Image (cartoon, rainbow, N blue to C red):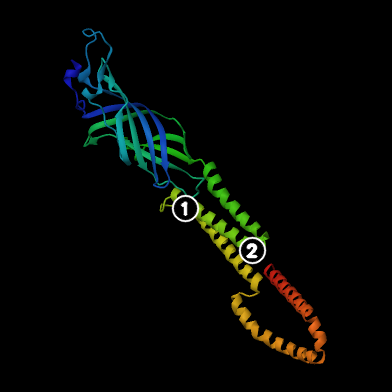
Amino acid sequence: MLIAKEALSQPQSPSCISNISVPSIVYETLSVDTKGLRFESQLQVMLSWEDPDLSWDTSVYHHDMVVLPVSKIWTPELHVTNGVQTTIKHGNKDLLVHSNGTIEHMIIMNTVVGCEVNLYNYPFASDFCPIAINVWALRGCGMFLNFGDVSKTSANRGDWLTENVELTAKGGRDDRNYLWVSLKMRSETPFLSLVLPSILIIVADVVSFALPLGGGERISFKVTLVLSFIMFLIILKDLLPEGGQCSPIIRKHFCFCLVILVLSMLQSMVLTRLAKCGTLWPCSLSKSKDSPLKDTDNEEESRPDITVIKLKASEEEKNSPLQKVVKFLNKMAAQDQKEVRHHRFANK
């Protein structure tokens, strides 16, 4: 008999208002998207309302309550006014109807809400995000919500922690109900994966000045540090939003560290040039400038040698291989002393 009525419209009352009781709401944060500044949540909402058309006399029908299919009965439809995407499904295919016309039912709401989370102190960020839950009402007619308890479950979800959930009426109006969700970021994982490696890279760059300038070990090591830091910047770009009210300070930290690493790499390149050539000019130019002086010196040195040959030709012919070896060793020693002077100058 009750199913045959097909009460699919809102119960009518003289005041044109239907009071919908919400005894309990169980809130759960599903995910938080720091890149898109959105968070997804699930609400299990218990509803209770009265429909006089579905009441009966217990003296005639000896049942205090019955179970009816939800598809044959009108149910309130809740809205998330600030939601980007909201899906509502029934908690069960049936609902409970009491003899006085009171109906009890549960719905499950999955909603995605945009939230401008303040990420200035990332990864030590925390903020509030509102979820506006309302029903249809127009010109004094419609529905009115009476809320009860609000609880949360599964507080830990990824890198974010749901600290508290409170229900408030915005502006003192009962038709504007908000769930204020307090979110706090679990800073352990971002700190260990981003902040701590950046500090260690800077420390490694400072210690790298102990490496020798020759052979290119210092420069190759510093280039590796710069490339590693750029990889961390790419990871950070994928985690944080492009815009927003407050730009995360960790971005400035990473940019400053990258500038320090690049300047340190350029300094090592300059010192390597000084250690090798003793000047910032290319080695070929410095050698070409010194070659005329060397030619004149060789000419001046060769002239007395010629006279010696004329005087003592037989002795010079015997000692010529030994003189060549001595000249070669002297040249090598002079070159070594020159390189030592360059290294000392570069390491100052």
Q: Is residue 120 left or right of residue 199?
A: left
- Camera-nearest residue between 276 and 39: 276
Give amino acid for label 2. Answer: Gly
Q: Is residue 183 left or right of residue 306?
A: left
Give amino acid for label 1. Answer: Ile
Residue 99, image x, y percentages: 26, 14
Check the image and report above or below for 265 versus 288: above
- The residue drawn where x is 41% and y is 35% is 29
Q: Is residue 206 left or right of residue 93?
A: right
Check the image and report above or below for 300 versus 196: below
Q: Nearer the viewer, mark 1 or mark 2?
A: 2
Q: Earlier in the sequence, mark 1 or mark 2?
A: 2
- The residue drawn where x is 28% and y is 21% is 95
Q: What residue sits right under mark 1 in the picture?
A: 234
Check the image and report above or below for 270 versus 88: below
Tell me if mark 1 has few (under 14), some (14-19) or many (20+) residues whose alpha carbon lies within 10 angstroms of its own: few
Q: Is residue 200 visible?
A: yes
- The residue drawn where x is 23% and y is 32% is 142
Marks 1/2: CA–CA distance: 31 Å
Residue 172, image x, y percentages: 35, 38
Residue 203, image x, y percentages: 62, 54
- Camera-nearest residue between 252 and 129: 252
Q: Is residue 214 left or right of residue 69?
A: right
Tell me if mark 2 has few (under 14), some (14-19) or many (20+) residues whose alpha carbon lies within 10 angstroms of its own: few
Q: Residue furthest left?
A: 4
Image quarter where the C terminus lies is bottom right
Q: Which mark is residue 215?
A: 2
Residue 89, image x, y percentages: 30, 30
